[in-house]
Amino acid sequence: MRSWPRPFGLQVTAARATLLNLPLAGLRILDLSRVLAGPFCTQILSDYGASVVKVEQPQTGDETRSWRAPREAQMWKDDASKMSLYFSAVNRNKRSMTLNLKSPAGVEIAKRLACESDILIHNFLPGTAEAMGLAYEDLKTDNKRLIYACISGYGTNGPNRSRPGYDAIALAEAGLLHVTGQKGGPPTKPGVAIADMCTGLYTHGAILAALAQRQTTGVGTKIEGSLFETGLNLLINVGLNALNLDTNGQRWGLEHPSLAPYGGFETQDGKTIFIAANNDRQWKILCEKTGLAHLLQDIRFSSNDGRLKCRDEINQIVQDTIKRRTKEQWHQQLENSGLPFGVINDVVEALEHPQATARDMVMNVSNFEASRDGSLKLIAPAVKFADTRMGVRFNPPKLGEHTDEVLCELGYSVAEIKCFRESGAI
């Protein structure tokens, strides 16, 4: 095996991360994943300082590069055909290189990269990595410290192991769509890819656990996650009720199966306020703050069990009351009262919310070459570190933007890189 002059990814990326005091500075990740679950996982780790090399198919790249929203094309330069907001949402702070994993040379380069990496992540169908010679068993011989994370639709064994994974299908088969939607209505798909995102979250946590274990054992391990298993985990109490009480769950819309009043109530100006009276104390606050104090004398409503029996009546009373004032009036009335409530914001209202501004939840990129005006807005990491300010060290990359750079770090010569390109390996 060739002895590389320096480990890839540490020339620039780790230096930037170290200067920012990021907790995962120096960690090297080879990202062979695409679409959402895997890229979201590696973006979390890259935000925390890891050096991530994203491997993409030559010419086409990650398919989300072409997943553009209506009218989105106008924001991109003509030569930025392989860029989208969908891709940008989960691929900042990474470097992109193209690699043809159907070619022997491309696979050999991937093996070299894996040999220099702390972590490898992919979302190939089970059996694909083995067929390419990129299975954990193939790679751990030369890199015993490698943490090998694979994401699939259903896991590496079982009757569905060979089926591709899709977010909505996983949610459907895991029972989550059965309990999502309006009461008495059809199942409803969540507005974002919950199974994909949560699988990425679960996998990032497992990777960090494996890193901690490696500090003790000195060796890496293989991690498996799947959209289906994530969906089953997300059933939480509904799943335990099914297992232990022989109940099958149902759709409740904005209501709660065990609490009342709990749900959305329309205001005078057509907005919806979500109110959750989770206990007797909060029920008392709701009544006192909304002019319904007389309900406190009604013995039918004195306990949550009683309120559940009268759910429809209570909901109608609260709705009639909330309809008499505007969203802003109710906000002023209920703020700091001790009653859990919140306006159901649209996406723009949420991102422009004063709390989002106070927490720096929108990041502005001012040197983004792919967009016509040179700018891009991104949603910031959800978790903050007290002594570290995370940001955008690398913009969402152009397809193959860093191919030559990474290959040079691996020790390949200019002539070798030219040969790889001419042969279609990169």
Image: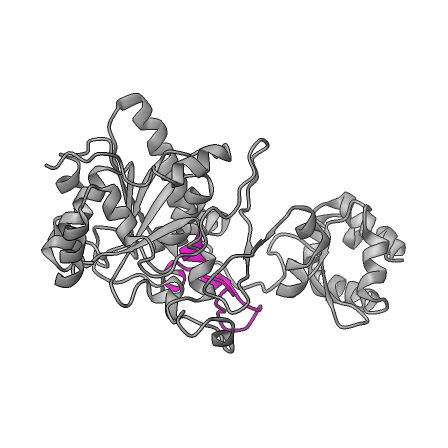
> Horizontal and vertical percent for residue 131?
11, 54
In front of the other: 100 or 401: 401
> Horizontal and vertical percent for residue 94?
39, 49
As displayed, is residue 280 above or below residue 401?
above
As displayed, is residue 81 above or below residue 242?
below
Answer with left or right where residue 408 lies relative to residue 94.
Answer: left
The main secondary structure of the magenta stretch is loop
Residue at left offset 63%, top offset 48%: 360
Say which quarter of the image contains residue 345.
bottom right
Answer with left or right where residue 210 lies relative to residue 312.
Answer: left
Q: Which residues are magenta?
A: 171-197
Looking at the image, can residue 82 be seen?
yes
Answer with left or right where residue 174 lies relative to residue 377.
Answer: left
As displayed, is residue 259 above or below residue 267?
above
Looking at the image, can residue 345 be seen?
no
Residue at left offset 41%, top offset 60%: 175
In front of the other: 34 or 345: 34
Q: How is the image coloured?
A: one colour
Task: Work out which quarter of the rendered image holds the N terminus and state it.
Answer: top left
Task: Work out which quarter of the rendered image holds the C terminus and state it.
Answer: bottom left
Residue 381: in magenta span: no
> Horizontal and vertical percent for residue 289?
86, 53
Residue ranking furthest to the top: 216
Answer with left or right where residue 330 lies relative to residue 142.
Answer: right
In front of the other: 110 or 37: 110
Circle count? 0
In front of the other: 366 or 180: 366
> Horizontal and vertical percent for residue 130?
14, 50
